[in-house]
Image: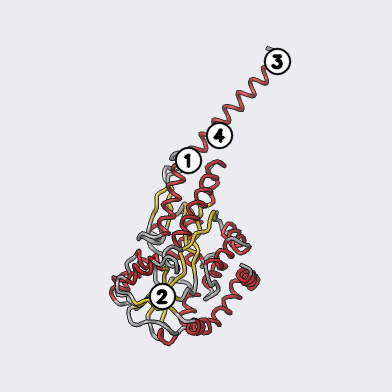
Amino acid sequence: MKLSALIKVCSLFFAATTGLFATSVQANNYKPEYKLSIVVSAKSPWEQGAQTWSDLVRERTEGRINIKIHKGASLVQGEQTREFTAIRQGVIDMAVGSTINWSSQVRQLNIFSLPFLMPDDAALDALVQGEVGKQLFALIDKAGVVPLAWGENGFRQISNARQAIQSPEDMQGLKLRVVGSPLYMDIFTALGASPMPMSWAQTQPALASGEVDGQENPLSIYLGSKLYDVGQKYLTLWNYVNDPLVFAVNKNVWNSWTEQDREIVRQGAQEAARQEVALARKGMTPDDDSLLKEIAAHGVEITRLTSEQHQAFVRATRPVFDKWKERIGTELVEQALRDIENR
Ligand code: X2X
């Protein structure tokens, strides 16, 4: 064998073995199990979305990425507003998280909680699938968390144990549980209620004991958590906000995976999110109101607002919208308004 040929063979052998070596080093960096956080515990589209994502990833990586779901925000002792920080720090590896809970760390995520910004599903789609969604993902990424797909918790409706709510006057003095987020405190204070910040884990016992009169959450959570069993017999459909969910991974964990596995995780998140959004919107349309029927069958009085009644809520919360528009960033909110207009 000529010297040049020998060198070639040797270098090929060297390349092959270092390649093998690199793969095994990468595999060694993988954890035996990855911790995925969600806030809800009961059956819901949110929980189902996390399950689908985990299953797809486990299957397609042939078990290299093995995900365990931790419900009830248990990795942060139920304190859901600390979830984002915990992902960033690596206490949590992965999450399907609500923008409400992450908004204390990424203030622009408050945009989805601007009262009555989004009139329908298409408006939410226009935001998350457009320029606003792109900018928000860049901000989440900059904060040290890798966002992969947008899911949806849903339009949030208000329930209480005292009386039907048709106007802000009906909310005077009502003790309402809200997520510990300043914007929600402002909204319900403007409406004349007494908002009480509390984690979701504490809410169900607080509703059962009568410590609080009401709460606001999407219908799927209301039903999945059986809130009709803890006295929540009055439900008003007012679609005032809608919180999207973000499928995300801690940055170091993301970087520890091979390119091929990252692609599987990203694809899996996108597929799971698509299915999750469809599920989150199911059963509350004129064509299919099965979810509403199921709720009504538990003796719940469901109130729908006339457009005049709706306007009274919009008017009462307008100053909060204006104040928070500035805090979130006027340009981003203007972009959102344009995208909704052109949806
Ligand atoms: O706490 C809530 O209300 C919930 C479950 O909807 C969120 O995590 C935002």
Query: In x, y percent, where is residue 270?
Result: 52, 52
- Residue 147 falls in image quadrant: bottom right
Label 2 secondary element: strand
Q: Which mark is residue 61?
A: 1
User: Can you see residue 23?
Assistant: yes
Specify the farthest residue to the front: 287
Closer mark to the observer between disc 4 and disc 2: 2
Asked if marks 1 and 4 touch (Cβ < 8 Å), the reply is: no
Query: Rounded to the nearest whole Å, what is the CA distance between mark 1 and mark 4?
Result: 18 Å
Of labels 3 and 1, earlier in sequence is: 3
The residue at which mark 4 appears reads as 22
Asked if marks 2 and 3 touch (Cβ < 8 Å), the reply is: no
The residue at which mark 3 appears reads as 3
Of labels 4 and 2, earlier in sequence is: 4
Q: Taking 110 as reference, is 332 left or right?
A: right
Closer mark to the observer between disc 2 and disc 3: 2
User: Can you see residue 212?
Assistant: no
Label 3 secondary element: helix
Label 4 secondary element: helix
Closer mark to the observer between disc 3 and disc 1: 1
The residue at which mark 2 appears reads as 158
Kind of residue at badge 3: Leu
Q: Residue at image x 40%, y 85%?
A: 170
Kind of residue at badge 2: Ile
Query: In x, y percent, where is residue 4?
Result: 71, 18
Label 1 secondary element: loop
Q: Give 307 or 113, whichever is nearer the viewer.
A: 307
Q: Taking 18 as reference, is 227 left or right?
A: left
